[in-house]
Amino acid sequence: MFAAIDKLFALHNAMLLESRLIKAFLVYSMLILVIYMLTSTKQTYAARCKLYLGMYFYPVYIAVFQLGHISVELTLRMVHYKPKQNRCYTADQARQWFSLGGDN
């Protein structure tokens, strides 16, 4: 039963990822068109390159700060981790504990 639920969750996550990718593609396509239309005159043509670069590097900027926050949080959790018992964890169990919140 748990295997079926895991497969269902995997399918659900795959569908959500696919829909997010489609939405991102549509949003970026529309944004490219809007930037092109706004910078199609001779006076605004010089700003087109800056706007395109800003459009492409803004998600990278956000991702770096989010991933930086996650790594700092994970490091703090590893430093302050106090096991209740003397247990031996495998690498997968430790990774699962640190990703789900643990039980200390």
Image: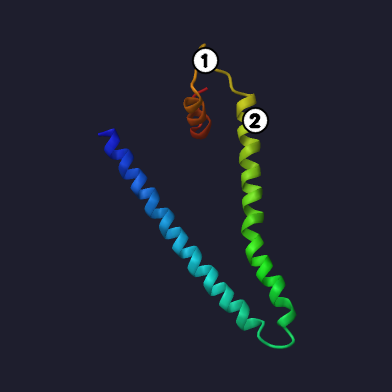
Q: Residue at the bottom extreme?
A: 42
Q: Circle 1 — which element? A: loop
The residue sitting at 29% across, 35% down in the picture is: 3
Mark 2 and mark 1 lie on one chain; the one further toward the N terminus is 2
Q: Amino acid at mark 1?
A: Lys
* Residue placed most toward the observer, 89 or 77: 89
Residue 74 picture quarter: top right
* Residue placed most toward the observer, 101 or 68: 68
Residue 76: percent from left, percent from top: 64, 30
Residue 69 picture quarter: top right
* Residue placed most toward the observer, 48 or 99: 48
Is residue 56 toward the left or the right of residue 100 in the image? Answer: right
Q: Circle 2 — which element? A: helix
Residue 97: percent from left, percent from top: 49, 28
Residue 27: percent from left, percent from top: 52, 68
Give the residue at mark 2: 76
> How dense is the environment of label 2, judged by Cα within 10 Å: few (below 14), some, or many (20 and up)?
few
Give the residue at mark 1: 84
Given contact means CB atoms under 8 Å apart, are the residues at marks 2 and 1 in contact?
Answer: no
**Count of numbered marks:** 2
The residue sitting at 71% across, 82% down in the picture is: 45
The quadrant in which the N terminus is found is top left
Residue 44: percent from left, percent from top: 72, 83
Q: Is residue 46 above or below residue 53?
A: below
The residue sitting at 66% across, 48% down in the picture is: 65
The residue sitting at 34% across, 48% down in the picture is: 11
